[in-house]
Image (cartoon, rainbow, N blue to C red):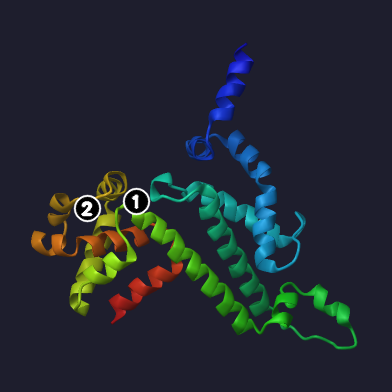
Amino acid sequence: MLSLLFLTKKKKRTLEETVLLIQQGNRELLDQLIDSYKPFIAKTVSSVCRRYIYESDDEFSIGLIAFNEAIEKYLPERGSSLLSFSEVIIKRRVIDYIRKQTKNQHISIDITNPQQEEESPGTVIVNELSLDEYHKKNDDQLRKEEIIHFQKILTTFDLSFSDLVENSPKHADARKSAILTAQTLVANQELKEFLLEKRRLPIKQLETKVNVSRKTIERNRKYIIAIALILSSDYVYMKDYIKGVLDV
């Protein structure tokens, strides 16, 4: 009877609840989850490598490590599912791996030995597309995935991209000030948790941490929230935008 009750409870546990237990230190559940999602990992890695990936392949090992990383970093309050979040992480890590492999190897194809193409990691991809084209194609895809993911999170804060365009500070100095305010918020665990849990800016508390007036914070509220969400997540391309603003 007890075992039946346990199984019933186990069936009702969501994936996100399982991840929470893993993050609290349940290593047995971690091993079970990774093992059960190996087909998902293989499929995701294969979509990047453009060939079927076996568990014996190095790329699959990269995918396993990335899936584990996604489990560790996953926060359900950000609005995405574990699988959509982990898919982004896996693709990013595998692409980084392929780049390093192709950069560290001198690839030369002997036309008298067509089998040589199969002997060098990444050669199939590099031979089908130039390396620059391959990087651009995957960068564009990951950038698109970041934007889609970010859009979903913005909706949970009752925000949209059009809101950000309309409320973005017009002057460079004002944008820098808003970004620095967002950085201060993210660096403070209490303020960051308030933002993610309450879905609103802790203006009163934030005012005491920055050299910016309450009126300015309120005027740039939507922009500060958006920047804070980017800084709190694994958004590589949008973080580059932030760096670009600060470097101007």
**Secondary-structure class at tag 2:** loop
The image position of residue 208, as x and y in percent, is 12, 54
Q: Earlier in the sequence, mark 1 or mark 2?
A: 1
Whole-number angstrom distance, CA of label 1 to CA of label 2 = 13 Å
Residue 205 bears which disc, if any?
none
The image position of residue 18, as x and y in percent, is 53, 36
For residue 160, above or below residue 202? below
Mark count: 2
| Residue at 30%, 67% in the rendered image | 162
> Which quadrant holds residue 126?
bottom right
Residue 201 bears which disc, if any?
2
- Which amino acid, mark 1? Thr
The image position of residue 221, as x and y in percent, is 20, 60
> Which quadrant holds residue 154?
bottom left
**Secondary-structure class at tag 1:** helix
| Residue at 87%, 81% in the rendered image | 114
Residue 156 bears which disc, if any?
1
Quarter of the image with the C terminus in it: bottom left
The image position of residue 83, as x and y in percent, is 55, 50
For residue 37, above or below residue 215? above
Q: Are marks 1 and 2 in contact (CB under 8 Å)?
A: no
Quarter of the image with the N terminus in it: top right
The single residue placed furthest to the right in the displayed view is 112
For residue 107, above or below residue 90? below
